[in-house]
């Protein structure tokens, strides 16, 4: 198309492929050694004060290009430079926790070993960052006691799953020391590789409970007067197990999200972003989702990062983070809404948008189904015939039993029931209903309702 323009730059261009150290303590000033091609300046003085990781990376690169995936790690805890030789227990480098070690694994199948003092019952987290910084190192982290016995071990995650790609493949392991004494922490490569590009950062210290959030898809096409599905993935760090509430930050007029509650311990939820059908932006617009939780008595906010994913050169799944969630509102032929009143006492006034959010949860029985009206001028007349009702979310615990005929073409009554084996009376949940084309064995939803709050009775 006319607006799909691009520019290509050719020549012997400067390219940074790695740098050492791979991170620093926030506010620190340090010399960083660059590795790459056509680089005039191999050492850069970096001042991290007032900068985040991205700005530090920009300062290092200057006018040079960067190998995709490279990242600079900033930490609040004291930094330690790895020193050779430290490839055996008797030559282990002494460290005091908490600390973050910046190291490079030497070529020839070497390992780096660090010694620390442990107290019985004390909890230590050992978090390696290598592939997450763009390093080719596939780390293996091993904690041993004074006798050399393995206390804990973690390795680069080779599972070809979306969760592994999202949560990072670098190991993070928790150790509770069984006795007082000296312990060693070893860093190696899964395949025994090493070299100047095989940098890493190793954080050793007490737990830092936190969470990270991602979402897919990275762009939304919301039907006017309807809803679009959003899948939120959660990474819970260092034992954090609390509830997280996800909401839109300063949404445009008539754009809302529903069902953004991640219960304790849950790592994936499906929610909806909806329009009211009349007032909404007429062009592509940006959205921002934020997660809010109480962590150790303090309020913590984390952005929900849009992602796309695909196969990496090594055959594993790779994730690409998108800077901003883009959305647009399209024609509402696939719009489907659940009626918040669920009574059908009077036809909706076409001049007044129906409310997107429910004012109160819908009571859903475990023995007797509840009737819930679904509204759609294009889908409701054939719901139960050409289109089959379904429960899109959650994946188990609810059934849409059938369709009750109505005398209005724009609505159809669906019978929703909860599974007594899954839910107890008084529990709350969010349910997303939809429909698929009869005969579709994959049951791909053609349209979905907004997320409906329910209470089990």
Image: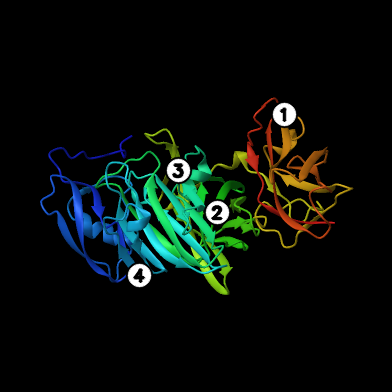
Q: Residue furthest top?
A: 439
Task: Tell me the CA gap for discs 2 and 3.
Answer: 16 Å
Identify the mark at residue 273; answer none if there is no mark.
Answer: none
For mark 4, give the secondary structure.
Answer: loop
Identify the mark at residue 386; answer none if there is no mark.
Answer: 1
* Left-right relation of 405 to 382: right
Identify the mark at residue 234; answer none if there is no mark.
Answer: 2
For mark 1, give the secondary structure.
Answer: loop
Residue 354 rendering spot, x and y as whole percentages: 67, 55
Task: Tell me the CA gap for discs 3 and 4.
Answer: 34 Å
Residue 131 rendering spot, x and y as whole percentages: 37, 47
Q: Nearer the viewer, mark 3 or mark 4?
A: 4
Task: Tell me the CA gap for discs 4 and 1.
Answer: 64 Å
Which residue lies at the image location 28% right of the left edge and 41% below the top edge? 108
Above or below: residue 12 compared with residue 361: above
Q: Which residue is mark 4?
A: 78
Task: Tell me the CA gap for discs 2 and 1.
Answer: 36 Å
Q: Nearer the viewer, mark 2 or mark 3?
A: 2
**CA neighbours of label 2 inside 10 A, class few (<14), some (14 to 19), many (20+):** many
**CA neighbours of label 4 inside 10 A, class few (<14), some (14 to 19), many (20+):** some
| Contact, mark 4 vs mark 1 (Cβ under 8 Å) | no
Quadrant where the N terminus is found in the figure: top left
Which residue lies at the image location 66% right of the left edge and 27% below the top edge? 440
Residue 320 rendering spot, x and y as whole percentages: 41, 45
Task: Tell me the CA gap for discs 2 and 4.
Answer: 28 Å
Colouring rule applied to residues: rainbow
Q: Which residue is mark 3?
A: 308
| Contact, mark 2 vs mark 4 (Cβ under 8 Å) | no
Q: Nearer the viewer, mark 2 or mark 4?
A: 4
């Amino acid at each position: 198309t006319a607006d799909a323009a691009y520019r290509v730059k050719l020549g012997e261009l400067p390219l940074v492929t790695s740098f050492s150290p791979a991170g620093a303590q926030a506010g620190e000033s340090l010399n960083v050694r660059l590795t790459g091609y056509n680089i005039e300046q191999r050492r850069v003085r970096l001042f991290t004060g007032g900068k985040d990781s991205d700005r530090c990376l920009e300062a290092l690169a200057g006018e040079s290009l960067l190998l995709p995936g490279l990242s600079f790690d900033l930490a609040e805890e004291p930094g330690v430079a790895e020193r050779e030789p430290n490839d055996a227990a008797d030559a282990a480098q002494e460290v005091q926790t908490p600390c973050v070690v910046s190291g490079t694994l030497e070529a020839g199948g070497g390992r780096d070993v660090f010694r620390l003092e442990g107290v019985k019952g004390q909890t230590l987290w050992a978090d390696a960052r290598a592939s997450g910084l763009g390093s080719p190192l596939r780390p293996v982290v091993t904690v041993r006691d004074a006798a050399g016995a393995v206390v804990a071990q973690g390795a680069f995650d080779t599972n070809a799953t979306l969760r592994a790609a999202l949560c990072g493949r670098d190991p993070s392991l928790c150790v509770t020391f069984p006795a007082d004494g000296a312990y060693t922490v070893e860093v190696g490569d899964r395949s025994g590789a090493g070299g100047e590009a095989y940098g890493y950062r190793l954080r050793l210290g007490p737990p830092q409970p936190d969470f990270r959030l991602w979402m897919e898809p990275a762009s939304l096409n919301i039907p006017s007067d309807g809803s679009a599905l959003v899948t939120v993935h959660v990474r819970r760090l260092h034992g954090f197990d609390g509830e997280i509430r996800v909401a839109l930050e300063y949404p445009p007029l008539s754009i809302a999200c529903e069902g953004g509650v991640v219960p304790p311990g849950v790592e994936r939820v499906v929610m909806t972003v909806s329009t009211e059908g009349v007032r909404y932006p007429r062009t592509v617009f940006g959205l921002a989702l934020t997660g809010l939780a109480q962590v150790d008595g303090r309020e913590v906010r984390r952005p929900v990062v849009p992602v796309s994913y695909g196969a990496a050169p090594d055959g594993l799944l790779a994730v690409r983070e998108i800077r901003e969630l883009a959305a647009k509102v399209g024609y509402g032929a696939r719009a489907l809404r659940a009626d918040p009143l669920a009574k059908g006492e009077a036809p909706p006034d076409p001049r007044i948008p129906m409310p997107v959010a429910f004012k109160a949860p819908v009571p859903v029985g475990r023995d007797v189904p509840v009737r819930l009206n679904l509204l759609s001028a294009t889908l409701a007349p054939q719901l139960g015939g050409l289109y089959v009702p379904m429960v899109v979310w959650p994946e188990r615990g609810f059934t849409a039993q059938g369709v009750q005929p109505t005398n209005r073409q724009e609505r159809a009554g669906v019978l929703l029931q909860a599974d007594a084996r899954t839910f107890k009376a008084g529990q709350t949940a969010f349910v997303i209903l939809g429909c698929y084309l009869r005969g579709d064995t994959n049951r791909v939803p053609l349209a979905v309702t907004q997320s409906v709050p329910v209470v089990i009775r």
